[in-house]
Image (cartoon, helix red, strand yellow):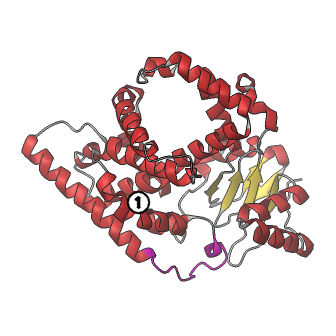
Amino acid sequence: MPTFPPFPDSQMGWSALRAMIRQHSPLAALEVFHHELGDVFRVNLPGFNPTVLVGPEANRFVLVTQRDELRWRAEHDPITRLLRDGLLVIDGEWHDTMRALMTPAFHRRMLAGYIEVMTCCTDQISAGWDDSPRDMLAEFRRMTLLILVNTMFGIDFSPEMGRLWPAVLRLLRYISPGGWLIWRDMPRPGYARARREVDRYLYGLIEARREALRRNQSEPNDLLGVLIATPTLSDDLIRDQMLTMLIAGHDTSTALLAWALYLLGRHPAALAQARAEVETVLGDSLPTLESMAELRYLEGSSTKACACIPRCTSARAPLPLTWNLAATVFPPEPACSIALPDPPPAGILAQPHLL
């Protein structure tokens, strides 16, 4: 007979709180509950009781089989307040329409033109590296921001990077898991100012591109041009898609690059093999789509690194859902989270063919 997911008891709650304080991450608390309660459980938080699912079967349930039965927009979450009607926080037909409109900018045929930009931006950031320790998450964030703004919006972000860097980081902290999960209306000082700074920049890009398209009557060749050329989109809706890409879009690549470098650094033999492959395939030549396809070991290593990133996807069930594999009923709740599988054994990075 189907049952509701279990709640942790008070002892588990204290253990989770200690783990969260010790590791400075809400993920630590979820790991405690997962260890004690299994792959499906609920968390008792003030104002809502999210259901948490863990593992590949749970991923498929939420992201594939029940995708159309879930709602991905939570009106009171910080990410919705920030992105408004951005692709990441809209549902149904409107989401599908916007995705179809934006997808051509990411098509494989566009990548050939992006490679030179990616190479130049990578060289620009790495030119400042020396033998001193570096925060590679920050370095890769700068790199991916330069690449994203250049390829998607057709603008060199370098002159504005220093000025907007604090605002971008503050917006990332605003949408990241934190105290707002428990206290929904907690004060968030500095957020409004950061949003205004970034908004001024984005609306300025929109205005300048509209004027350029009116003067030149040229075909749009990047995401910003496609959005502006769509008559049904207002400047506000274009801003929402641009901010979605600027904040959420670059962060995924940043995390992947940082995790991949960290894991390769922990496995010297794997790092040596990846470097040898790059030197053999590319030598002193710039990468192309064809040569990049030959970097199979590096691709396998980065794919495995992606699988190791502890990510969560949040959704809402408007009606009770049954996960047949676990005979579990999920009640309609404000949020339902799914955590990806645990990282693989340490040695598997050296064997990407096992993916």
Say if residue 331 shows up in the picture.
Answer: no
**At 29% from the left edge and 62% from the top edge, which residue is drawn?**
201
> Residue furthest toward the front?
131
Horizontal side, residue 322 vs residue 143: left or right? right
Above or below, 187 relative to 230? below
The percent position of residue 275, horizontal first and vertical second, equals 60, 26
Residue at the spot 68% in from the left edge and 64% down from the top edge: 332
| Residue sticking out furthest to the left | 215
Residue at point 35%, 64% (across, down): 163
Q: Is residue 72 visible?
A: yes
* Residue 107: % across, % down: 40, 31
Q: Residue at x 42, y 20 (%)?
A: 285
Around disc 1, counting alpha carbons within 10 Å, would you say few (fewer than 14), some (14 to 19), or many (20 or more)? many
Q: Quadrant of residue 239?
A: bottom left
Name the amino acid type tagged 1: Asp
Quarter holding the C terminus? Answer: top right
Nearest the viewer among 165 and 6 is: 165
Q: What kind of secondary structure does the magenta stretch mostly adopt?
A: loop
- x and y, in percent, of residue 255 in the image: 58, 48
Q: Which residues are magenta?
A: 178-191
* Depth check, front residue: 73 or 38: 38
Q: Secondary structure at mark 1?
A: loop
- Quarter where residue 40 is shown: bottom right
The percent coordinates of residue 352 (x first, y second) are 71, 26
Question: Does the magenta-highlighted stretch encompass residue 218?
Answer: no
Q: Which residue is mark 1?
A: 85
